Image (spheres, grey):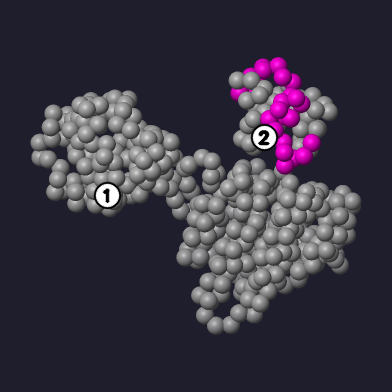
Amino acid sequence: MSKAHLSPIDVYKLLPRTNCKECGEENCMAFATKLVNREVFLDHCLPLAEKKEANYQTLWELLKPPVKEITIGTGNAAVKIGGKEVMYRHELTYVNPTAIAIDVTDEMEDDEFKKRVKGVEDFSYTYIGINLSLDMIAIRSTSNDPLRFSSAVKRFMETSSLPAILCSFNPDVIENGLLVLGKNRPLIYAATEDNWRDMADLALMYDCPLVVFAPNDLTLLKSMTRTLLEYGVEDLVIDPGTFSDEGLSDTVNNFTILRKAAIREGDELLGFPILGVPLTAWIGHEGAPEVAIWNETWLASMLVTRFADIMIMHSLDGWSQLPLTVLRNNLYTDPRKPVAVESGLRSFGEPDEASPLLFTTNFALTYYTVASDIESSGVDCFLLVVDSEGLSVESSVAGRKLTADKIAEALREAKAETVVKHKTLIIPGRAARLSGELEEASGWEIIVGPLDSSGIPKFVKEKWPTTPST
């Protein structure tokens, strides 16, 4: 049975078919359909998961992602990478957003070291209701001194609970780091053609994932993953090398070839998360640091869109990381599910029973744009958020997801007539065509507002009646 042609019927035949509803679905066929669409997990079928008999193993092999999912860290701070099912997000969706690690070195002064670690932890930006943050710390041994590296790892443990990457090609250095941090399951960077056996022993001893590094040599990379798998190391991350400038085309090609081999060709020896190192943009750089930051940022942006599951970076500047994390968030949003907020009545400022009442849709970008414009202007008002199935005002009106009847029903459900003592509703300018129908359906007076929410403050000031209709 081919994964590419897997159907709900194929999965259904291997389920218990008792319709017990323990998975939360109405029947086994509904569960099978969601399994194929990757909307639920196999272990949600408790009768099958508890026994783990032949059918469970068969389904696991059919449903497991072509790119293995790897966990770095432990507990609530753990980060998952990989687990990809498809080459491109429109085919299904991407899972486990690209993890971003910021580097520190064992030669940094204590204050600088702790400042960078705290800067990573404190990086936070709210974007359409989602908190954007950074994920990990990469501790690099630039001294190649095992004791100095161990001291740096101790400083890290005292400062942060984030997952870590231990970076050195020297097994003795890595071992000293693992003596301190091994129980926290850091990612070991990296096994090479020369040190793979020692690194593999450390990965097995401490049960840590291991990066396989073969710069610009995919044949060697595949050979090393085969060898390490046979040696017993199962949690691998692959690094084909990250090159900027003249080597950029090789970098993009290698990342693409690796992901295509795993997903389209089913090559399990290459079915592992891919690590990129945009930090290489700093190597040999001379001149203004802004140039290196810019080069690192566009390189990281390319790798996020070209299948990187984890990246090591140097820049902590907001103008570098903010657009990168926004790009990552947008790319990893499920295209099947519009980003929406909960519908209902919101209040801004200190509105009273005579304050304006406006409405918008529950598309997250629309809602947060409107909310931001209202908050920044200091307008005291109520805002009715109407369920439009996550579509913008114009799109939902055109697609009949937002109708006069639906808005009238939202007004009734929110009991708007008890919140304000008038019956006047300001509607978005892009919903103007609904004004007549809405007056008939709701019994409210309708005022058509501005096309853009940035015009709300001026509109309310000039147009809102002193004595609204009652």
* Circle 1 Cα neighbour tier, 10 Å, few/some/many (<14 / 14–19 / ≥20): some
- Mark 2 Cα shell of 10 Å, populated few (<14), some (14-19), many (≥20): some
Three-letter code for the amino acid on which mark 2 is drawn: Val
Residue 130 appears anywhere in the view = yes
Mark 1 belongs to which amino acid? Leu
Q: Is residue 457 above or below residue 7?
A: below
For residue 151, the mark is none
Whether residue 189 is visible, yes or no, is no
Does the magenta segment cover residue 132?
no
Q: Residue at x 29, y 45 (%)?
A: 430
Q: Nearer the viewer, residue 20 or 142?
A: 20
Q: Quadrant of residue 36?
A: top right
Is 383 left, or right, of 58 in this rendering? left
Horizontal and vertical percent position of residue 269:
81, 53
**Compared to 281, does 414 lie above or below?**
above
Find the residue positioned furthest to the left.
467
Position in image of residue 69 (x %, y %): 71, 46
- Please tell me whether the stretch drawn in magenta is mainly helix, strand or loop: loop
In the rendered image, residue 470, in percent from the top left (x then y), is placed at 13, 28
Q: Residue 451 shows which numbered tag? A: 1
Earlier residue among tags 2 and 1: 2
Q: In the shown orientation, is residue 48 left or right of residue 445?
A: right
Q: Which residues are magenta?
A: 1-25
What is the secondary structure assignment of the residue under circle 2?
helix
> How far apart are the two marked residues, 2 and 1, measured between alpha carbons?
42 Å
Task: Identify the residue shown where x is 20% and y is 36%.
Answer: 446
- Compared to residue 71, the image places residue 123 above or below, namely below
User: Horizontal placement of 416 versus 165: left or right?
Assistant: left
Residue 13 falls within the magenta-colored stretch: yes
Instruction: Name which residue lies at 77% across and 39% down.
Output: 2
Residue marked by disc 2: 36
